[in-house]
Each structure stands twice: as C-alpha cells, then as structure tokens.
Amino acid sequence: MALVKLYVRSPSAVIGLLLLLAVLAMAATAGWLYPKDPLALAGRPLVWPFSNPRFLLGTDNSGRDIAAQIFHGARISLLIGVVATVISIMIGITIGAFAGYYGGWVDTALMRVTEAFQTLPNFLLLLVLVAVFGSTITTVTVAIGIVSWPASARLTRAEFLSLRNREFVQAGRTLGLKDAKLIFGEILPNALPPVVVYASVVMAVAILLESALAFLKLSDPNVASWGNLIGAGRDVLRVQWYVSAIPGIAILVTVLAVSLVGQGLNDALNPRLKGR
Amino acid sequence: MRVLVLAGRRLAASIPTLVLILIGVFLLLQFAPGDTVDAMMAQMGGGDAATARELRRFYGLDLSVWAQLGNYLWRLVRFDLGFSAIYGKPVATVIAERLPATILLMTASLSLAFFFGLILGVVAARGVNRWPDTLISTLGLVFYAMPTFWFGLMAIVVFAIYLQWLPAGGFEDITIAHAGLSRVLDIAQHLVLPTLTLGLFYMAIYLRIMRGSMLEVLNLDFVRTARAKGMDETRVVVRHVLRNALLPMVTLIGLQAGTMLGGSVVVESVFSLPGLGRLAYESVVQRDLNTLLGIVFVSALLVIAVNFIVDLLYARLDPRITTGA
Amino acid sequence: MSPILVLDAVSVKLPKGADRSHAMTEVTLSVAANEILCVVGESGSGKSMTANAIMRLLPGGVEIDGGRILFEGRDLAGVSEAQMRRVRGAGIAMIFQEPMTALNPLRSIGDQIGEMFEIHTELSKAEIGARVLALLEEVRIPDPVIAAKAYPHELSGGQRQRAMIAMALALDPKLLIADEPTTALDVTTQAQILELIRDLQKRKGTAVLFITHDFGVVAEIADRVAVMSQGRVVEQGSVSAVLENPQHAYTRQLIAAVPPLKAPPPRALSAEPILSMAHVSKTYRTGGFLGRGQRVTHAVKDVSLVLPRGGTLGIVGESGSGKSTLARCLVRLIDPDSGEIRLNGRDLACLSREEMRAETRHIQMVFQDPFASLNPRRKAGELVAQGLIVHGTPRAQALARAGELFALVGLDPSATDRYPHEFSGGQRQRIGLARALALEPDVLVADEPVSALDVSVQAQVLKLLAELRQRLGLSIVFITHDLRVAAQVCDLVAVMKNGEVVEAGPIGEVFGNPQHAYTRALLASIPGRDFGLKREAATA
C-alpha cells in the first residue's frame, strides 16, 4: 500500500502506467475491433492515414490495414516482451544466485560463461540462433531470452555477494538452515527488488530486439509485428513514409511506458534518492 | 607499469572466454540446416551428390564434429579463418574489407554518446527535479525508447529526402572518385546520420547512469568535507564529484561494447554501410557459416580490445585498482 | 574571556513527515577560545545537527528557523552563501566521524589538504606543498612525504584521521568542530587522537566544539559539557560539575548507564569445562598468482581457551585482532584450519556440514548489528521460531514458543507479528537474543552484542543478559572491544592481538594487575579512566 502511494507521487510514473494500460487495452481489444486476419489484403495499397474512414491509419504497400496491424502487433510485442523477460530473468537469477552464494570455483565458472555471453555481441548471437533454429515466434522469443540474461545474472550475483555475509544470513546458518533455504528463503527475497526493477529494462530491450529482428525480416513473417511493418514500409519510404513511421511510434510508446514504470518502481523502492 | 600488468592479466583471462565462445558458437552452428557446401551448391545452381561429397572431403566436413572443431581452432591459432564460399575469398579478407566502416562507426558513436551523455548527465544532476533535469531526462527516455533503425529511417526521410542535406546511405560517394581530404569529408558526411542513430541511443543510457551516479556521489561524506572547506558548488563538482561519478559510466562502456557492436548490425543495414554488422546479416541470410563464425571471432576480439582500454582508463581514474585496496 | 561562537536560541526545522518537528529547539551554547566544549547525547539528540547548523551544511528540507549563530560577533544564520564559504574552512573547520568516507578516495592526501590553501589563499604550488608537509609533521604522521602522496586507502584509520585534522587546522581556524572524531577508531588510536587534538588546541588556542556520545571521552577532553536530548540542551556546565554532580534527571541516567571499569566481585565458577578450544588457527591467503606474491594473514593463531559451565568468557581486542573470526569459528560460520573446539566433549571442528547443522542446537550466536542481523522480510515471531522449525518443532508450537521467548527477553508477546523495522535498536537486539535462546543452547556466543546501542539501552541489554545467564544457567562467550562492558559481564577474559591471545585469566586479575604490555596499553587507553574508577568508588 505504501508502495502504491510512493509510486503515484511521481507524475512520470503515472504517465508510464497510463501508457502501458493503453497498450494493454490495444492488445486486449485487437481481436474484437479487428476480428479479421491483420495480414490479409484489406483494400487498396498505400492509402494515406485519415483519408479513408475504413482505414483510419491507412494501408501499407500490400494493401493491409495498418491500424489492424498496430493493434495486433501490441499483442505480439507484449507477449514476446513478457515471455522473453521471464526466461532471461529466471536464467539470470539462477546463475547469479549460485555464483554469488557459493563463490569460489562455482562463481569463477559461471562468471566465465556470463562473460562469454557479454563478450559476444547479443544481436549477433541472436542472428546465429535464428539462423540455426529458424524464425518462428517461439524460437525468436526464447532466443531473445537467452541473449539477454547476463546483466541480470551479474546484478543478482552482486546482491548475493553483499547479502550472503550479512548477519541475518549468518544467523540463519547458525540456526542450522540448509543452503537451499538460505538462498531462496532468506537471501533471494532481499535481492529481488533491484532485479525486478531491472526486468523493466530487459523487457524494453526485448521488445526493441524483436522489432529489429523483424525489421531485418528475420522474425516470424506470419505474425503482425510492428518491426515487420516498418521493414515493409522501408520500400516506400521516399513518399509513403507513414507506413514505417506509425509502427515506430507504437514501439516508442510501448518501450517508453515500460521504462517509465520501471523507473517509477525504482524510485518507489528507493525513496531516498528522490527529492534531494 | 602496474596498470599494464593488471590490464594484461585481465587480457590473458579473456582467452578462455574467447575459446568458450568459439566452441559454443561452432557447436551451435552444427545444428544449422545445411552447411557451407549446401550454400555453395545453391550458389552454383545445384550439382550432383558426388561433387558435394568431394567438396565436403576437401573442406574437411566429412570428419566428426570434434575433429572439425579441433581443425578450426588449430587454424585459428594460425589466424586462418577459413574460406568464404559465397564471396569466393578467404574469410579474413572479407572481414578486413568490412572492418574499417564498423570501427569508424563505433568510435564515432561511442565518443558522441560518452561526451554528451557525460555533459547532459551532469547538467541534469545539478538541476535535479528542476526544468533542465526534467527536459534532459525526458529526452533521454525518448531516445532510449526509440528503435534505432526507426530513428535512422526517419532521419533519412527528414535529412536525406526532404531537406537533402545528407546522403541517405553508403560509406562514400562511389560515383565521384574522391581523394585525400575531400574523401575524408565525404566519408564523414556519410557517417553523420548512422553515428547519430547509434550514438543517441547510447547517449540516453549514459546520461541516465551519469545522472544517477552524480546524485549518489553528491550524497557521500567527502563531498560534505569539500563543502566544509568552503568550496563553491562548481568546484566541488569538478574536483570531487565528477571523477568518482565517472567510474560506473566507464564500467558500463566495457559491459556494453558487445551490445553496441550488435546495434551496428541494424544501423549498417539501414544505411547500407559496408561494415561488419551488415556482413553478419548477409552471411546469416546466405547461410555463409564460415564467415559468420569469423565475424563472431573478430567481434569478440573487438569487445575484448575495448575492455582492455576501459581497464586502462579505469585504473587511471581509480588509484585503488593499482595500489590494492 | 569573550566567546568565539555563541548559539542563541537556535532552532532547526525538520521536513514534514519526520519523527519530530524540530531537530534542534532553542539551543543556546557558547565556546570561547582555548576551550573545549563537549556536546554529548545519544543518537537522535540533535548533537550532529548542531554542528551542521553552525556550518550551514544542512541536508535538503532541513533549515534554521530561529535564533542567531554568532561567530566572532557576526550572525552566520543571516550571511550570504558566498560569505559563508569564506568562513568554512578558514574560520570554522570541521572533522568527521569516519575518516575513510570523509576523504575523497581518488585524490591524494596532500592534494586534499593543499586544497584548503588553494581555496582561501593565493599561495604558490611550491609553498602549498611545503605547508602540507609541515602540517602532516605537526599531526605526527610517521612519514609526511610518503603520506602526502598516498591515497586514503593506503593509510590506517588513525593516520587518516590525523590527515583530516591536518586539513582542518591548515588555516588556523578560530573554531574546530569535531563530530565524533574517534568513534570509528580503536581504543589505543582513539587515545592518541584525543591527545593530539588537545595538544594542538592548547598550542594554537583554538576553540573546539567536540561532539560525542561517550562520557569517557568527555571526561578525558572536555573543559565544559552540554548535554543534549531530543534537540534541546538539558544541562550545561563545567566538566567536573556535570560529571560529578549532574542536576538533570536525564544526565544522571546517562552517567549511571556508563559501566564502571572495575569488575564486580568474582563469582564461583564450575570446574567442569563446557567449551574448550585447543590450538585453533585460521589463516587467510589473498591475492598472488600460483603461490607467488601471496599475502598471508593469521586471523586466529593457535588459540587455546576454556569456558567453564555457567561462566562468561570475554574475548577483548581491537579491530583486526581476530576476536570475531574466533567467534565465527566456534559456530563454524568459518571453518578453522586446525585445532579442536570441544563442546560437551564433542569436537565441532571436525564435524561435517550436516552434523554441524544438528549440533547448532547446543551453540548459538548473537550478532552485533541490530539492523543487519534480522531478515527485514520476516516477522519477528517467525524469526524467533525459525530455529525451532528447522530442528523439527511443528510450526504452530514453535510460534507459540516464540511468544513465550518474547516475554522472557522483556518484549511484548503480542508483537510477534510485527516486522523488524517496527522495533527500536534495543528491541531488535532482544529479538536476536530470543532467537538464539529458542533452541535452548548450552553456549551462547555473543559478538559485540551491545556495541551498536546507545549507552542507556546498552545498560538494559547487559542487565537482561546477566539475568538470563542466572536463570537459564547459560555459558557465554562474549566478544567485545569495550573493556568497560567486559568488566561488567565477564568472569574470565582473554586479550587478543593480531590473532593471538596475549593474556588470559579471571577478569579481576587481568584488569587489576595486567601482565602483558599490550593489556596495559589497552587499559591505559580507555578514555576517562579516572572518571570510571572514581565512579566505582562513589557507587561502591
């Protein structure tokens, strides 16, 4: 309750939340407002926005309704964002927790792997994964999750390193608690808040990664993704720039919303940095 | 001297990381549908099974996976990255041709991001919660949330198509043969939009980190000591806060070098720059796995090189590194 | 003598939502040249805020809302920020509690001292360099040339504080404000720093406003004393008047809470040992590569001690003496390299992790930090019941027992479903005690259990510990750096230095007739030693 109070104190956090709710509403109403396949031919190609009431945002170069693609695209972006974030945070927490708690050679080995993932440009690895496993929405989502865990692993590890020698953990050990209980029952709940806040960054990046992949025509071509639409609009960029512009704004708004909510959460969890 | 020894030790420690990456990606690529020979056959417009078998033997592709891996690593030790069937050239040559554009783009973007990120972060932190801070932070958030490729496209629409101030793509004007200074200027002109596109995104990240770390440092005890000496605020910031606040930002550069290189794949595609990133994209599309593996190797080397420089920089900034805390 | 600084009914307002409206209420004080005024009080009394208000370095949202701060006759509350900056450092200088964080870690000591001259004078670089060396010489830093080039992390705590003092005295300020300058230091270092401050103050005739929580330090250094509580000065006067004849009830209570230095008469001890350590050692190796350039630290070196059943064994020493490492070896938070730790005859040192988990029933630990030692995300009752649950007691029964334990340690049994942050420091320490006692251990290892507490709370917790020892027949290993506290609670004492026990025996003998030079130095360093002995005579 106190957290909600702290959260709504910041206007930017509230704006972020409203934007996020708007995107969610778009995703929720997409099937109802645009029941037809958004990728099906809907009318004349390259209708400018606001010129035809049937296509509020116009049509793209293949005559598909842009508005329908934007609404359905919200589903895809959020779905990929959330699932990839969950995958990446799970991997990150597990690896970071074990590395930070056990230290020694476990830490060295796990951190070597993390380092390897950070040394290899993540988008390049994403390309390799997609090249190897194909571009279905499932593989793309999992691949994005796999390339974006290292930072959360480092963060979790840092939290564990500082918490594992805290006296309350030592107290747990002197009471006879087992390692698993100490890790998941005592340390993790205390290590979680910064990781949860960081999840918003991961989600923003995941949405951006998928759109970039789709823009390069390497994501699933059978779903209405904003990145796909931008990529399609590129061919008519000289005159009908709106085909690329509109989905870009949708991505911008979504990522902005996620970041603002994350920042709002962060400020609410660490109120001491605010207002100084 | 100690600095070099320490940074050298870190450099040595990155060799296992590099080997790990190569083994991992090599094995990963074994799962790829089709191999180099398939790609070559497709390039040649098909061929019979006997030729394919012959080619596979020639390239050592008929050996076991582990033998192939061993061969590959052994060749790497001799700086032989193999042969690109698609480009008909050694992979090393292909990559060497593409490297300059990427390095130029990276250096320019990183400098832009670091310099303006630093300045804007300081300005925002000095006026925290007042209008300069709000303006800068909002701008930062917007740049951060913008997909880079989209920003690039929109920049092309505005600056290349409507205003016609800058070229829409390419590394240099190939219709006119420039030489000397005019060539440099021509390349610079071509790189303005790509640099902005890639740089502004990272500037947004750096400015946020810088602002946060400035605010953090401003609350530390030694800042109070400095004020108790009778120092004015500007001097407090310049002499005591700035250097301390820079440390997290410098760390971040090292951590993000890889991400930035990844970002150049997209930016180079948008602006048709003949760089490493675009090569990576092309080799994925054309299934040129040898080249892809070579790019992975070279990018990892680049990232390690950036981290080496970052280590040196960090050690210069923080005496605790070299004298042991 | 006319005062240098006069605080005339100064009030400082706190932002809305703080626990009280004012940090300082109508505080009236004065300090004259050549005089040390000690402002003494417990945490939250407003004593540090007084220092910040004089320097006009108040945190955001906190402001002076009444009264005058007269420095050499000029009201600092009214001057411009630019004028105030000329006063800071040159007219009034300040030293702080934690010299490590008060110095910029990235700049050399000489550089930071020299800055004083750069800000306030027109001296050339060479002159500044010479002045810096002279200052470092004056504060008796061993090698001034090296120290000037060193970075803060390369100096010891005491040397850092000397550097801070050198910096503060650079421009011969009329007034020096010292905010708990020795609290973070070991007792022998503290004695040296106190002596240095007094010595420099006498020579230069500086007025000193010395803020402290420690009456021992007051007795050692003060000419006059002001006692603060809840943002008000409740009593002030000469040091002898306040210490020997306190008028205000609060002052009396504070002074009564300071443990006297003399041990109570010895108790009869059982001959049967419950815990015995034999040749316990723990060595740390850091850094180095393949065995070269390695740094070896003997944290605990060949320690042999015996705790008789029902007795209390004190382990005293300064930071880095290995006392905490030894305590952690006893409960196997740290695995000793060699030696035996026999509890009821069973050697804990050679148990497997699994066996040790079962053995924790018999030996429990109380920690130092009342904030860090309780998981903030668990309810207090759960924290106390946790041990019982782990060792097989059904949850409901364990929680009921937690209520009983709350009553045992003097807490309200209905408070078990509150979270740790809802308790005060002293109450939290009681929760920690209840948690340790829940398993009904034979031996309690208490690691600095009262060091983080204010003196009056400290007295209450020590009293509780003594009662419980009597009632439950506990045997205690009591780790502390505070010899006064040790004198009050321990039957036996072992003095540790650099990982070794230099002297051990019954407390009365060790403190009354110390054999080892280090023990003597330690005892001689206790601030206000005469005050402690005098009080003992008065109360006896």
Image (cartoon, rainbow, N blue to C red):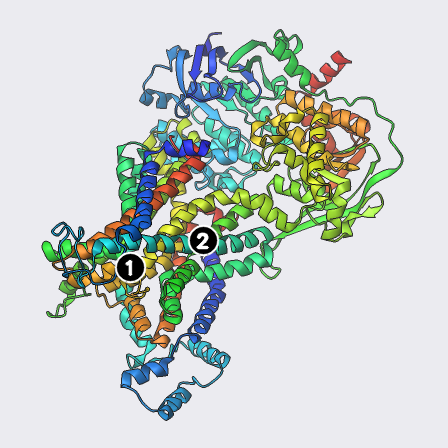
Disc ID at residue C203: none
**Residue C18: percent from the left, percent from the top?**
46, 22
Element carrying mark 1: loop
Q: Residues within 10 Å of mark 2 (few under 14, many from 20)?
A: some
Identify the image quadrant of the C terminus of chain A: top left
A191 to C93, vertically: above or below: below
Indicate which disc residue A224 carries: 1
Question: The residue tagged with tag 2: helix, strand or loop?
Answer: helix
**Residue on which disc 2 sits:** A86
Residue occupying image coordinates x 53% and y 23%: C200
Report the mark closest to the observer, 2 or 1. 1
C201 lies left or right of A65: right
User: How far separated are the C-alphas under marks 2 and 1?
Assistant: 22 Å
Residue B239 appears in view: yes
Identify the residue at image location x=51%, y=48%. Answer: A158
| Nearer the observer, C307 or A206 | A206
Name the residue: 19% across, 65% down: B170
The picture quadrant where one finds residue B160 is bottom left
The kind of residue tagged 2 is Val
Residue at point 28%, 47% (across, down): A253
Q: Chain of mark 1?
A: A
The outermost residue toward the bottom is: B50
Q: Position of residue C406 (x, y in %)?
A: 69, 28
Sequence order check, earlier mark of 2 and 1? 2
